[in-house]
Amino acid sequence: MTWTPDAATSHLEEIAKVRGITIVWTEKPPESHPGYAMVWINPPTSPIRYLTALHEFGHCIDPQAVNLWKFCGKRENAKDYRKWINAESAAWGWAFAECRPALAELVRERDWQMAGSCWLSYGRHLALQPVR
């Protein structure tokens, strides 16, 4: 499969249009806000950037990710890292299900490690939480 940023951009814009999500293109770290149906994403100049953008959409679209975001967004629940891990997993699951075929084959091991470090950061916080 040949990587084309234009095709990836078109796919992301199509998702945004169909789902009513606003895209803010940025070079800052990507993020999302399901409450406002907004994603701040990097231009998909590489397969991992495309997959990461889909992950941010997943936070706004996947029902489990959205419900967990609502829970974790409340100040009293903000440090419940078990829920954050589940929300991250749901958003990544949505991204993998939605990505164009054979994309995962283009993502390099170094890219997977970078993406995984974000997810693992919640695990580090979880390990520091007292057992209830």
Image (cartoon, helix red, strand yellow):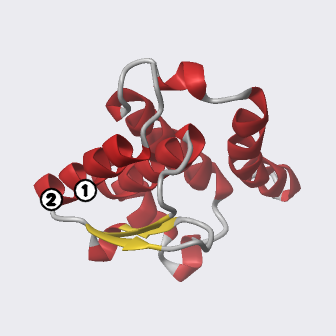
Q: Residue at x 38, y 37 (%)?
A: 94
Question: Which amino acid, mark 1?
Answer: Glu
Determine the image quadrant of residue 13.
bottom left
111 to the left or right of 96 = right
Crowdedness near tag 1: few (<14), some (14–19) or many (≥20) residues, C-alpha within 10 Å = some
Quarter of the rendering occupied by the N terminus = top left
Q: Residue at x 70, y 34 (%)?
A: 112
Q: Residue furthest right?
A: 128
Q: Of 37 and 3, which appears nearest the observer?
A: 3
Q: Residue at x 57, y 78 (%)?
A: 76
37 to the left or right of 31 = left
Q: Residue at x 15, y 64 (%)?
A: 20
Residue 8 lies, in percent from the top left, at 37, 44
Residue 17 lies, in percent from the top left, at 15, 59
Residue 93, relative to residue 87: is it above or below?
Answer: above
Residue 98, relative to residue 37: is it above or below?
Answer: above
How far apart are labels 2 and 1 at the CA level? 6 Å
Residue 91, relative to residue 93: is it above or below?
Answer: below
Of helix, strand and loop, which one carries label 2? Answer: helix
Of helix, strand and loop, which one carries label 1? Answer: helix
Asked whether residue 109 is in view, the answer is yes
85 to the left or right of 52 = right
Residue 24, relative to residue 93: is it above or below?
Answer: below
Q: Which mark is residue 39?
A: none
**Pointers 2 and 1 in contact (C-beta within 8 Å):** yes
Residue highlighted by disc 2: 17
Residue 80 lies, in percent from the top left, at 63, 61
Question: Which amino acid, mark 2?
Answer: Lys
Crowdedness near tag 2: few (<14), some (14–19) or many (≥20) residues, C-alpha within 10 Å = few
Q: Which mark is residue 13?
A: 1
